[in-house]
């Protein structure tokens, strides 16, 4: 199979501004060090204050890369979670059944991993909330009760 050339955008959100810039560079360097990945071009954008934030910064890098296999392509999708990715070349991709089956199984395994992590996190949260309920019921109620929304009193009908 031909190498797969892509264009992708990697984004970072955080603080302080210099750390965000450094973290994005580290991410792109790490991407380039992955087996089967060759960075062809990269363009970093200056961090900017995130919309609606006082001290949270965001930045992104436009990266053109070449992947040796479609397996590498999907591995990068899951490992780096680019905000956008586009295959530039080749225009058409052909798969053998075993390749497609292998990819499907890897994706399914990853989804099962995420599901297990989510369930474990929910169980841990529930355990902590139970212990908080036992130790400090007032605090438990305060953090588990949704905030009240202001409701306008019903309007009285006008008298004729």
Image (cartoon, rainbow, N blue to C red):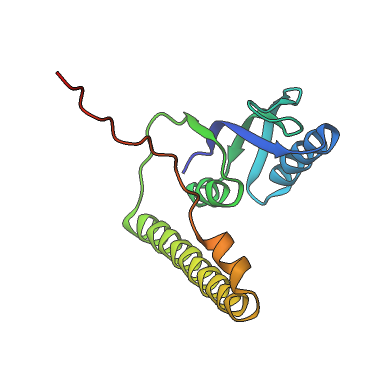
Q: Position of residue 101 (x, y in %)?
A: 35, 60
Residue 143 to residue 32: above or below = below
Residue 26 placement, left or right of 35: right
Location of residue 5 by image quarter: top right
Identified at 36% across, 55% down, the residue is 100
Q: Which residue is the extreme one toward the left?
A: 160
| Residue at the limit of the structure toward the right, as seen here | 18
Left or right, residue 123 beside residue 40: left
* Image quarter of residue 139: bottom right
Which sits in the foreground, 105 or 18?
Answer: 18
- Residue 43 versus residue 111: which sits nearer the camera? 111
The relative height of residue 139 versus residue 65 in the rendered view (above or below) is below
Can you say which quadrant of the picture contains the C terminus?
Answer: top left
- Residue most extreme to the top: 160
Residue drawn at (77%, 32%) of the image: 55
How many numbered discs, if any?
0
Q: Residue at x 51, y 34 (%)?
A: 85
Of residues 91 and 29, the one drawn nearer to the viewer in this rendering: 29
Q: Position of residue 50 (x, y in %)?
A: 67, 28
């Amino acid at each position: 199979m031909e190498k797969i050339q892509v264009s992708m955008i990697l984004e970072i959100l955080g603080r302080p501004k210099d750390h965000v810039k450094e973290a994005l560079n580290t991410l792109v360097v790490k991407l380039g060090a992955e087996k089967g990945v060759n960075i062809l071009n990269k363009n970093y954008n200056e961090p900017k204050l995130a919309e609606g934030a006082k001290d949270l910064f965001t930045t992104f890098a436009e990266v053109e890369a070449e992947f040796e296999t479609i397996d590498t392509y999907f591995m990068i999708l899951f490992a780096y979670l680019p905000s956008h990715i586009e295959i530039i070349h080749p225009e058409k991709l052909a798969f053998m059944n075993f390749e497609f089956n292998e990819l499907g199984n890897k994706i399914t395994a990853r989804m099962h991993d995420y599901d297990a992590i989510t369930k474990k996190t929910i169980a841990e949260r529930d355990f902590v909330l139970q212990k908080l309920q036992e130790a400090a019921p007032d605090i438990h109620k305060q953090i588990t009760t949704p905030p009240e929304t202001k409701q306008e009193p019903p309007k009285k009908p006008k008298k004729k």
